[in-house]
Amino acid sequence: MLETRNLDKSFGAVHVTRDVSLKLERGERRVILGPNGAGKTTLFNLLVGELTPDSGAVLLAGEDVTALPVAKRARRGLSRSYQKNTLFDGLTVEENLGLAAAVHTGSATRLWGDSLATPEVREIVEEVAEQVRLMPYLHAKVSEVSYGVRRQLEVGVALATRPLVLLMDEPTSGVGPEMAKGFHELLNDLPRDLTLLIIEHDMDLAFDVADTITVLNYGEVVFDGLPDAARGSKLLKEIYLGSWEDA
C-alpha cells in the first residue's frame, strides 16, 4: 500500500535520511521509533511531498508518487496528522470535519460555504465523529475544547478525507496518561483496512497498536520487524538507554 525505495535526503552536510526502504501492506499498522534527530519527521515529510528526496522513490498503492505535490498525494489517499494542531479555531468541531469531508467529496466550492449541507458530507462527519469519539463536542468551537479533544479532531479531520494510508506524527504528544490511554483504544478501534504509519515515543502505545516496528537511528533503518523481536533487541536497548525495559 505504501512503499519507499532507497530514500535519501541531506540538508547541506547533514545526511538526515539514508537509504530508507519500507513496505507497508494494506491494513498494516507500523510504528516508527527512534531518538530525537533520527530522521522520523523528515521521513514523513518525504512521504507526503513536503520535501523532495535527493534520491529514491515513494509509491502509493503501486503508483510512483515521488514527483507529485502534497495535494495530489492526498487526493490519491495519503493523509497525515501533525504534532501541532492545524485546525480552524473559529469553527466548530463539526464544521472542521465537514470541510475535510467536503474536499474529499468535491463539494467544497467555497471555503466558508455550508459544507455540511451535502448528505454525503454529513454521513462522513457522523461516521468519523463516532470513530474518534467526538460526538459530545460536535457543536463546540475548536477554541473552546481541550487540547486532548483537539488531538482527536486532528485524527478525525484526516479520516474525513477517506485515506488509504494515514500518517500520524506523535498522536499522544502533550496529553496526559488518561488521554493517552484513550488514544490507544481509539487507534485500536479504527477500521482494520486502514493502513497506519505512526511516529511515537510512547513505548506502551507502540507495542499496543503495532503489527510491525521500524526503528530509525541517524537516518538509517536499524530495525524492522515484529514487536516481540523489538523487545528482545540489544541494539534497541542501547539506543534507548534501557527505556525498553519499561515498555
Image (cartoon, rainbow, N blue to C red):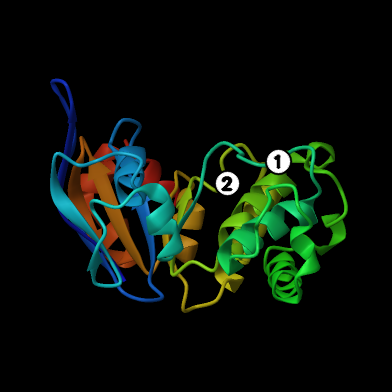
Residue of label 1: 88
Considering the numbered disc 1 on the image, is that residue within a helix, a strand or a loop? loop
Q: Image quadrant for the N terminus?
A: bottom left
The vertical placement of 182 against 123, above or below, is: above
Q: Residue at x 23, y 39 (%)?
A: 217
x 49%, y 66%: residue: 163
Residue type at mark 1: give it. Phe
x, y percentage for residue 105?
60, 68
Q: Position of residue 198 (x, y in %)?
A: 43, 54
Looking at the image, residue 14 lies above or below residue 71:
above
Is residue 20 visible in the rendered structure shown here? no
Q: Tag 2's secondary structure?
A: loop
Would you identify the image quadrant in which residue 176 lies? top right
Q: Which mark is residue 124?
A: none
The numbered mark, 2 or 1, whose residue comes first in the sequence reads 1
Q: Could you tell me the amino acid type at mark 2?
A: Thr
Q: Nearer the viewer, residue 59 or 106?
A: 106
CA distance separating discs 2 and 1: 20 Å
Q: Residues within 10 Å of mark 1 (few under 14, many from 20)?
A: some
